[in-house]
Image: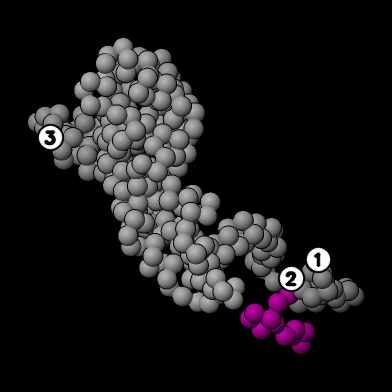
């Protein structure tokens, strides 16, 4: 009778051969510790960013906390004790301080609008120019002029368009009623560095307009004006609004140019904060400057809240 060997059941694995050693079990992965390492697990990398968050806490969190604490704290001139109060905040939003805040907002809005329009037109002329050298010259000059602000710019304008300035005496501008130490003079000084900044800001967006879009519009019978009205301007609107918001924030935070040119003759919140820090406040209102600074921070946060969504929207087209 033949030898009938039992066949292995399905899925039971290979049949062991007589005399062969059994395979050893796989050794556990002991890298990084005694316990086996899970597949797909990533090492913790959060300790690497601890210095960054420490830097933020010291350089930003500590001053911000001090500002908020001082804005809602009033010192008693008799006892010297401090108490929680909203007097500083309410005082910073009334009287001459409210006028200064309004003046800064008006100046920033007006200069931001002019800088956006003028800078966009200059950038468009550079993009459509057939001379590559012109683009290099304009971009280089804009990068330099965008950083030329503060006291040096104010002294340059005073020597040029001041009461005894060269241009004022040459063209007799004093007879026309022009005064550099006015709202108009501040607008001219701010535009000197804001227009180049807008040129540098809007150039990438204008470069992102694809020529195929204009060719497709022309093939459909659209004129150049219709292309800009229905395609170009809608696509550029988020970038232009983002640039305008950036111009507003730049003008709103500028201090040295206005302080040197007009001093306290023009109501601006930055100059009033400097005067309050120098002790030009009433007794018991030493923290009034911190309250005005808090108002500026709130406006700056609102500006950032508007600018970030605009940047994300423009990235969808040009990213």
Which residue is found at the position 53% from the left and 77% from the top? 83
Q: Quadrant of residue 7?
A: bottom right
Quadrant position of residue 87 = bottom left
Q: Is residue 70 left or right of residue 315?
A: right
How far apart are the alpha carbons under marks 2 and 3?
63 Å
Q: Which residue is mark 1?
A: 31
In the rendered image, the vertical position of residue 217 relative to residue 126, given as above or below: below
The residue wearing badge 3 is 226
Question: Considering the numbered disc 3 on the image, is that residue within a helix, a strand or a loop?
Answer: helix
Display coloring: one colour
The single residue placed furthest to the bottom in the displayed view is 1
What residue would you read off at disc 2? 37
Q: Main secondary structure of the magenta part?
A: loop
Mark 1 surroundings: few (<14), some (14-19) or many (≥20) residues within 10 A: few
Which residue is found at the position 31% from the left and 35% from the top? Answer: 182
Q: Which residues are magenta?
A: 1-14
């Amino acid at each position: 009778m033949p030898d009938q060997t039992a066949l292995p059941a399905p899925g039971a694995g290979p049949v062991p051969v007589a005399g062969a050693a059994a395979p050893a079990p796989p050794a556990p992965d002991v890298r990084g510790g005694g316990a086996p390492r899970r597949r797909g697990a990533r090492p913790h990398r959060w300790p690497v960013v601890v210095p960054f968050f420490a830097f933020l806490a010291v350089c930003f969190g500590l001053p911000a906390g001090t500002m908020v604490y001082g804005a809602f704290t009033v010192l008693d001139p008799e006892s010297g004790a401090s108490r929680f109060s909203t007097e500083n905040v309410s005082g910073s939003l009334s009287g001459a301080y409210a006028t200064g805040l309004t003046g800064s907002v008006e100046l920033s809005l007006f200069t931001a609008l002019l800088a956006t329009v003028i800078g966009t037109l200059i950038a468009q002329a550079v993009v459509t120019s057939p001379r590559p050298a012109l683009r290099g010259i304009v971009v280089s000059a804009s990068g330099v002029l965008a950083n030329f602000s503060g006291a040096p710019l104010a002294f340059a304008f005073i020597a040029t368009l001041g009461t005894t300035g060269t241009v004022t005496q040459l063209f007799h501008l004093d007879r026309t009623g022009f005064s550099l130490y006015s709202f108009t003079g501040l607008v001219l000084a701010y535009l000197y560095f804001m227009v180049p900044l807008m040129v540098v800001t809007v150039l990438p967006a204008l470069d992102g307009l694809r020529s195929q879009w204009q060719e497709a519009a022309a093939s459909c019978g659209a004129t150049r004006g219709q292309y800009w009205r229905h395609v170009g301007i809608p696509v550029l609107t988020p970038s232009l609004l983002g640039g305008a918001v950036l111009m507003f924030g730049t003008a709103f935070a500028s201090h040295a140019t206005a302080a040197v040119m007009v001093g306290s003759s023009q109501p601006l919140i930055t100059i009033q904060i400097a005067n309050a820090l120098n002790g030009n406040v009433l007794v018991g209102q030493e923290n009034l400057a911190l309250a005005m600074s808090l108002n500026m921070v709130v406006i700056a946060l609102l500006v950032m809240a508007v600018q970030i969504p605009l940047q994300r929207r423009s990235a969808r087209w040009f990213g």
